[in-house]
Each structure stands twice: as C-alpha cells, then as structure tokens.
Amino acid sequence: MLCGDAPAGQRESFDEITHLIEGASTIAVCAHTSPDGDALGSELALVELIERTWPEKRVSALLADSDVVPRTYAFLPGAQRLVRAADYYGAPDLFFCVDLSHPSRLNEAEAVLGRSRSVAVIDHHPATERFWDAGVVRTDAAAAGVIVAEYALHVAGALTRSMAQCLLCALVTDTGRFQYQNANGECFRVASALVDAGASPSEVALHVYQSDLLGYLHLSATVMGRIATFEGGKIAYSYATSADFAATGVPVAECDGLVDVVRRVDGSEIALFLKEVPGGKVRGNLRAKSDRDISAVAREMGGGGHPAAAGFTVEGDIDQALSVVLPKLRALYAQEGEAR
C-alpha cells in the first residue's frame, strides 16, 4: 500500500538499487558521522533487509567514526554488530550510504567508499553532486527511515519486528517525536505500518527520551541557564564546553538533544546550540520553528541539513564560532526588511 503511494520514479530507483545489490557479493553499509537515531535505525534495518532477502550476501554494518554506538541507541536490534570503518579493510562490491548524500560526511568510512566498486544511496538531505550509481534522495521525506521502510516493502513485501523497531526510532527522532515541520502524512502512514509490524513506540520513548543519565540532566540545567536571545527573542542560543562534558561525564555524542532545550523558548524562531568537540572544534546545531531556511547558514559554515534542521562544524572555540554564525542568522531577518 505504501509503495503504491510512493512518489513517481521511486519504484524505478528502487529497482536500480536492487540490481546493484544482486550484482554484489560483499556489501558495506554506513551512515553519516556522529550518527543519530535516523542514521543508525535506517542503517540497521537496511542491513537486516539485505541479509534476509539475499542471504548469500556478506554484509558489514559500519560506523563512520572511531567511536562507540551512542548509549541512547544501543537498544536497537543489531547495534552490537556495528564496526568502526577504520577497522574494516575490505574493498566491497557495493558501498551503501544511508542518511547522507555527500561523501565528506562519511569521515573515516570515506576511504572504504573509495575502495568500493559501486555506490548506492538512500537519503533525505539536499544533494549537491551525485556520486552514486543508484539511489533515492528525497528531501520531502521526513527521514531516511521512511525511504528504507518503503524500500523494504518494495522488495520484501513485509517488515520484521526488529526492522520496524529500528525504523520507528528513525522516524521518531528525526521528526522530534512528530513535532517538527517535516512530520507529514507519508511519515505518519509509514509509522502506522511500522507499529502494525511490531514496533513499540513506548520502547523507543523509554530508551531515547526517558533514560537520561543524571549527568545529562545536570548538563541540561547548565545549558538552560546560559540561554540568551537576540533579534527581539527570535534567535535563542546556548552552549556547552569541554569542561562541562568533563564535569558531568556526558559524552559529546549523547548531547545532540540539547538543541531542543534551546528550541523551547517561547517566541523564538531559530535555536542555536554550540558544543566544543575534540580537536579544537565547535559543532553547531540549528533548528527553525518558522519558514526561514537555516540550512543555507549551515552550508555557509561548511555544514548542511534541512531548512528546519541543520548543523555545521568549525575550527575554534565557542566565542569564535558564535561571532561567525550569529551575524549570518541575524541577516536572515535583515534581508527581509524586519527590524533589527
């Protein structure tokens, strides 16, 4: 049913992906660096789909970084099989990118991509240049998990409970629990199909949103206490330093949700959260509650994303990052002739 409602051309693109899979003996699947729930959930579901549909294939599930799976997502079925790309020395017949359509976001897995014979992509981020042999890149999809679910139904006609659980996590996290602007009708139809297939919304909620470490709650309080606003309250901003992470014991990989703490400010239209990461860098998360395209600002900062959810990483400290990004955010209002 969902496949019948899919956008024109998606079936043909799915068939092209299938052709690549059928012609490959070894397949490596990888999501983007600093993976979130959509990245990991979509990757793990796709890996299971390929192995169940084509059991003769040798499939490897890769992490783009030399890091562990974020604690929040360790409950996902199959998470224990993920291996660091730096520890994978093969030259796969097929490299499958999930939840990214730019090779630079593969980090250490980009070297594996370079050794691959062919490339497939499933993504919902804007793509600047095609580097894949077959794929589906749909910016109107709420999450990569939506497309993976539709592909699973296209090739297998059904979803296992474990696949559905991974994909529900993908949808829930990338829509902010169905609160973001990207939560469209297709997303809810897919979510319904996933629950019908055995996915548990309460289990996703328990692990992702109701199992915070005490240190994370303390860090959240610190971030809340630092919130400042600009442009008459339309831009809300806060940050976390390396010292904050050390004091609370919270890994950097587990604090992406802090941007939503900033996003809660009444009257704000844009939320900015900056965090210091290893290597003398700052990672920025942007969220929009209006129709302003914050992804344009993220791209100017060397990052990318969606109009309402984007991010970037820059060299320097918090003050240096803020001095560059804040004028760009303010310019979104100045360009429209709004009062500064």
Image (cartoon, grey):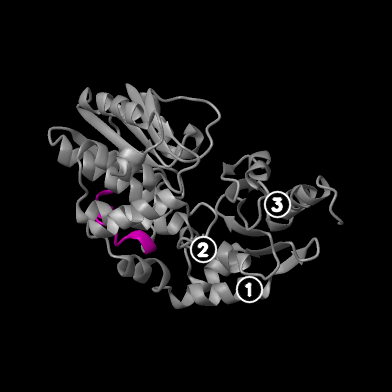
> What is the C-alpha distance between the residues marked 1 and 2?
13 Å
Q: Nearer the viewer, residue 46 or 158?
A: 158
How far from the left and from the top, in percent, is residue 156?
19, 40
Query: Is residue 187 rendered to the left or right of residue 298?
Result: left
Query: Nearer the viewer's eye, disc 3 or disc 2?
Result: 2
CA separation, marks 3 and 2?
19 Å
Residue indicated by mark 2: 257
User: Which image quarter: residue 277?
Assistant: bottom right
Q: Which residue is mark 3?
A: 321
Residue 100, position in %: x, y? Answer: 45, 39
Q: Which residues are magenta?
A: 72-82
Label 3: how many Cα within 10 Å (few below 14, some 14–19, many 20+): many
**At 26% across and 32% down in the image, what residue appears?**
27
Q: Earlier in the sequence, mark 3 or mark 2?
A: 2
Disc 1 secondary structure class: helix
Q: Mark 1 or 3 closer to N-term?
A: 1
In the depicted structure, whether residue 233 falls above or below residue 104? below
96 left or right of 230 in image: left
- Label 1, label 3: how many angstroms apart (C-alpha)? 19 Å
Q: What is the crowding at mark 1: few (fewer than 14 residues within 10 Å), some, or many (at least 20)? A: some
Which residue appears at 33% of the width and 23% of the height? 118
Residue 317 spot, x, y in % from top left: 68, 54
* Viewer-side residue, 154 vs 43: 154
State the image quarter where residue 191 is shown. Answer: bottom left
Q: Is residue 254 above or below residue 308?
A: below
Tag 1: amino acid: Met
Let me know if residue 79 is in the magenta part: yes
Determine whether, in the image, residue 108 is placed left or right of residue 204: right
Write down the residue under mark 1. 224
Residue 279 visible in image: yes
**Local SS, label 2:** loop
Q: Are marks 1 and 3 in contact (CB under 8 Å)?
A: no
